[in-house]
Image (spheres, rainbow, N blue to C red):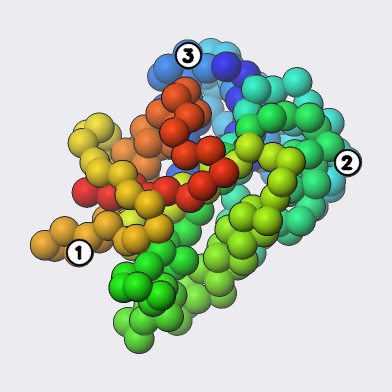
Amino acid sequence: MKVALIGATGMIGSRLLAELNRRGHQVTAIVRRPEKVPALPNVAAKKGDVFDEKGLAELLRGHDAVISAVHFLDSDPKKLLAAVKASGVPRYLVVGGAGSLEVAPGVKLIDTPQFPAQYKAEAQAGADFLGLLREEKALDWTFLSPSAVIAPGERTGKFRLGGDQLLTHDKGSNISAEDYAIAMVDELEKPAHSRRRFTVGY
């Protein structure tokens, strides 16, 4: 597939780029600093600004899908959505946050006392973005929330998928960025969560 990846050099974006490349997809890596994109076959690095709606739409045009891996506080959800719609690309996959996942009926992770204060603004922005997507009628979107902790680690291919509830195990709630990337590219190739949020964890 021809995939536009916004934010291809970040912690999760770089793993998505590697996974897409491993599976033979053609990727346009849209970043602020193209020189930071690794030289890989079938990867074209393009300079893009997530706040430039018109310019971003031009970069996205002609792709089969867009994957957005930018921090919510470093972008404007309404401009991102408008750019994707203007580009005519049919599918939009979003690297989501864990804060909006439920830990009990009606209780979100972000609202628990132990949720780290330094991540609250980003988590709330992610929850707001999900809310916007849920009102979206035109786009075929998917929002993939990681577990509570996502960090560089192993590519194992062994994980669980869930819906709106936080996945936990006896040692907590986590997923490697490498396995998160597998789950996202699996969804790209075989859509199973159209216009829905899902989550991945061990």
Residue 192 position, x and y percent, is 44, 33
Residue 36 lies in quadrant = top right
Q: Which residue is mark 3?
A: 24
Residue 96 position, x and y percent, is 50, 53
Tell me which amino acid carries mark 1: Gly
Residue appearing at x 22%, y 49% in the figure: 202
Residue 157 position, x and y percent, is 25, 32
Sequence-first tag of 1 and 3: 3
Residue appearing at x 80%, y 32% in the figure: 87
Q: Say if 57 sits above or below 110 in the image.
A: above
Residue 30 lies in quadrant = top right
Tell me which amino acid carries mark 2: Lys
Q: Which residue is mark 2?
A: 54
Q: Say if 164 sits above or below 109 in the image.
A: above
Left or right: where 69 falls relative to 48: left
Tag 3: Cα neighbours inside 10 Å, few (<14), some, or many (≥20)? Answer: few
Left or right: where 146 falls relative to 129: left
Q: Secondary structure at mark 2?
A: helix
Q: CA distance from mark 1 to mark 2?
A: 42 Å
Viewer-side label of 1, 3: 1
Residue 78 position, x and y percent, is 76, 56
The answer to whether marks 3 and 2 mark residues whose Cβ atoms lie closer than 8 Å is: no
Q: Secondary structure at mark 3?
A: loop
Q: Say if 57 sits above or below 122 in the image.
A: above
